[in-house]
Image (spheres, grey):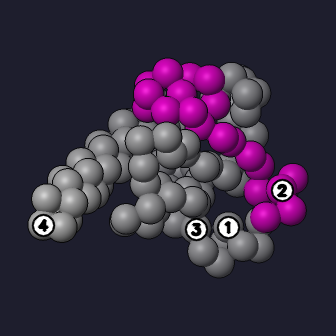
Amino acid sequence: MELLRESIAVRTSACERERLAVRERLAAALREYLPAGSRVWLYGSLIEPGRFREWSDIDLALEADPPAMSIYLLASLLTERCLRRVDVCLMTETRLATAIRRKGEVWTV
């Protein structure tokens, strides 16, 4: 039983380190692709310690369309940079906007 607890602790610690590394890569990429002052919301497992796993994606909502590109191109570029699938939506177009504003984590780029 102790071996199982130790294995779970090692896995949990590795997932948390990866979650923090993904957040850093995402922040750097957003600074590159979005204009200064842009507001974005993170939501889902990336903002909650203990929920991020090996297969977790990145959920991101934008306040406005990114300049000079579609949200689909931005999602593709972020996926490449973050080494995780990135789902991007616009706050003005998602039915989840209220929940994202309530539970999400807002970043200003």
The reply to whether discs 3 and 1 touch (Cβ–Cβ < 8 Å) is: yes
The mark found on residue 2 in the picture is 4
Callout 1, which amino acid? Answer: Ile
Which callout, 2 or 4, points to the residue nearer the camera?
4
Percent of width and height locating residue 9: 20, 61
Task: Give whichever of 70, 9 is nearer the camera.
Answer: 9
Quarter in which the N terminus is drawn:
bottom left
Residue with the mark numbered 2: 94
Percent of width and height locating residue 23: 38, 47
| Label 4 Cα neighbours within 10 Å, binned few <14 / some 14-19 / many ≥20 | few
Q: CA distance from mark 3 to mark 2?
A: 14 Å
Task: Give whichever of 70, 37 is nearer the camera.
Answer: 70
Residue with the mark numbered 3: 104
Under tag 4, what secondary structure? helix
Image-quadrant location for residue 82: top left
Under tag 1, what secondary structure? helix
Percent of width and height locating residue 61: 67, 52
Callout 3, which amino acid? Answer: Gly
Q: Is residue 71 above or below residue 64?
A: above
The mark found on residue 62 in the picture is none
The mark found on residue 100 in the picture is 1
Image-quadrant location for residue 25: top left
Q: Is residue 6 above or below residue 81?
A: below
| Label 2 Cα neighbours within 10 Å, binned few <14 / some 14-19 / many ≥20 | few
For residue 27, side relative to residue 1 (left or right): right
Q: Earlier in the sequence, mark 2 or mark 4?
A: 4
Q: Earlier in the sequence, mark 3 or mark 4?
A: 4
